[in-house]
Image (cartoon, rainbow, N blue to C red):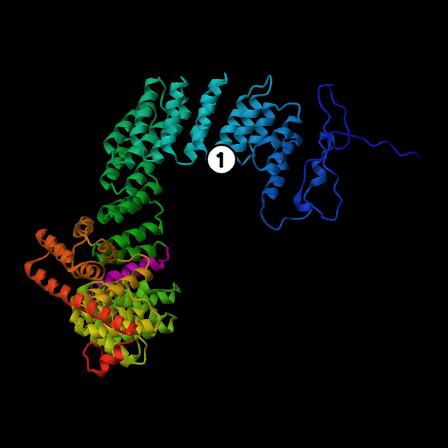
Amino acid sequence: MPPQPKKFNFFDGHRKPPTHNRPTLRGPIFSNPQTHNPNQTHRPPTTNFDLQKWSPEDYSITTPPRGPSPSQHFFSVAQTLSPIARYIIDSFRKHNHWGPPVVADLNKLRRVTPKLVAEVLKVQSDPVIASKFFHWAGKQKGYKHDFASYNAFAYCLNRNNQFRAADQVPELMNMQGKPPTEKQFEILIRMHSDSNRGLRVYYVYEKMMKFGVKPRVFLYNRIMDALVKTGHVDLSMSVYNNFKNDGLIEEGVTFMILIKGLCKAGRVEEALGLLDQMRKLCKPDVFAYTAMIRILVSEGDLDGCLRVWKEMESDKVQPDVMAYVTLVTGLCKGNRVDKGHEFFKEMKEKRYLIDRAIYGSLIEGFVNDGKVGVACELLKDLIDSGYRADLLIYNHLIKGLCNVNHVSKAHKLFKVTVEEDLKPDFETVNPMLVCYAGLRKFDEFSKLLAQMESLGFNVNDDLVKFFSLMVGEKERVKMALEVFDNLKPKGYCNVHIYNILIGALYESGEVKEALTLFQELKDSKMEPDLYTYSNAVLCYIKVGDIHEACSCYNKMKDMSLIPSVDAYVSLVKGLCKIGEIDPAFMLVRECLANVTSGPREFMYFLRIVHTCRSNDANKLMVVINEMVQDGGQPDDVIHCAVISGMCQYGTIEEARKVFSSMRECKMLTESDLVVYDDLLIDHMKKKTADLVLSGLKFFRLESKLKAKGSNLLPS
């Protein structure tokens, strides 16, 4: 049988053009790099393109991509586009930027309709190409953009973070003879509102007024809500005034938007005034009052909450469970637990279902208020109501009982948490540990630690937390040290606890006891770490033992550890105090090289040394005055920086001018001036001796001087 002729359609084959003016397009342009086979033979490129032979089905993805790529994104988007829109988007994808090749591809089409422009802009991710394409389409003969294309253009710009350009679309529409309607402004307002750009919403609103477009009540509500959410309550009230001047009638939503904004800003009087206006149109319901109470609670305005509650009662609005929960929880957090307990009793009288969260808030509030008995009664009421107390409630009660030294009862509650499998944690046992320590019941303390070990607690880590909290208050440092002395024989000690106690003793001024602990740690089998040696440096500098402080520093360097910033500062100040300027200078540079944010004093040290290259006392005083304005105060480190820089790059005379100027500015006393002048001369002698020695070594003359018994060279 003769072969049947192939049926041609728009997607496959050849179709005659509808008119003679429409060119015939030949040659495929659509390509899929993911399905490209290098072994296939490629046809030479042709200048003609036949759109009828271009079929998207021939280039469908058959294998899943291995990773995200622009081509993958294109093919996923192209599934929903028309063939001509796919052709245009594919041209943008291949050429990557607007230029003659893209224009040549577009000129192969007869014309582009506004519907096609909107379809392309809805998926375009490059705002530059989208803008060029939009303006190119507008230049076609007889073409005019419609509202859909303008809206798609605005969405495209905003989607690509060009929202300022999107705000200019109404002016573009007006210039092209298409005045914008309320819909175009609503699109811009909605885009800015969703991105929390309140000031841009107000900007679009003002532009809307300039064009003479008046919003509907719905759009007014949207504008005011966006301004309130971004904290611009005054602008929202000005928009509301325009709302009233336009003769529009408020809705319940309008009032609630403004009332919530005023409550959040703490303007309760104005909010209640709007509430009176709201009553003339519609009666506020319990949800409106609950929203107001929730906002006032979040802002901590409990007096405002109670006033709103009275307004609700005057309107004879029956509060629901959520309103009670919001108010009681807020009162308990605001240290008004007695008032919250009154509302709790009202709930019980009205036979409302009381949530366990209310019991928890009341128990926490009474414990913080020192009324542990009432809190225990609430626990009994909670259990009688059929609830099971959670771990947080037990933690609050244990803490309250320990605060009044009823640690035995607290321990019974702890056993209850274990029996109910609530998995107690450190927050549960810490109040009992503190109470045992305060009562000097160290045997009970050790028994509790043993019980914690049997329950799977990490006792070493928990003891570190315990001592960290104990030394947080200076009056408890001695108590913490006493507890540690009783725990050491039982093996409850580690380097972290030593570090905590050494640091706390240093902060409280007990430096000798801190050094005793440090020596005890060194004599034990435990190895001191970075924090141990850093604290030891601070302690040794405090007692004036620079030699031991330097030994600790050298130990850290041997262990490849970087000292703390406080250790660097303390060591530099100690060296400067005894006139060891060169080692101090070395530590300053090392500190700034090793730490991310070094002390500003060290930065000024290097800057002063660098300024000394000019050998100008006036320039040096400019730097010192700048440091004083920056909040610094000249001390031994800064004075030694002047000496170091001037001895290395300047002269003694200029250094003395600097010290004299500092004396005139009352940065130095007369006695300090004498001390630093002597230190300046001594350091200059050292530098001169070093230069002489270097010269002798350079010329190899030190052997002759040694033979003559010269004292210039060290033995």
Q: Mostly what secondary structure, the magenta segment?
A: helix
Establish if 473 lies above or below 102.
below
12 vs 90, left or right, is right
- In front: 467, or 525? 525
- In front: 583, or 440? 583
Residue 100 placement (x, y as % from top left): 60, 30
Say whether residue 609 is visible.
yes
Which amino acid does the dot numbered 1 rest on? Answer: Arg
Say whether residue 374 is visible.
no
* Residue 685 magenta-highlighted: no
- Secondary structure at badge 1 equals helix
> Which corner quadrant holds the N terminus?
top right
- In front: 144, or 265? 144
Q: Determine the residue positioned at 31% across, 22% down.
A: 241
Residue 440 placement (x, y as % from top left): 20, 73
- Say which quarter of the image contains residue 12: top right
Residue 129 placement (x, y as % from top left): 54, 32
- Say which quarter of the image contains residue 565: bottom left
**Badge 1: residue crowd in 10 Å (few <14, some 14–19, many ≥20):** some
Residue 188 placement (x, y as % from top left): 44, 28
Establish if 306 lies above or below 711.
above
Q: Determine the residue positioned at 47% across, 23% down.
A: 183
* Residue 401 magenta-highlighted: yes
* Residue furthest right as drawn: 1
> Which corner quadrant holds the C terminus?
bottom left
The residue range painted magenta reads 386-406
- Reading the image, the residue beneath label 1 is 159
69 vs 675, left or right, is right
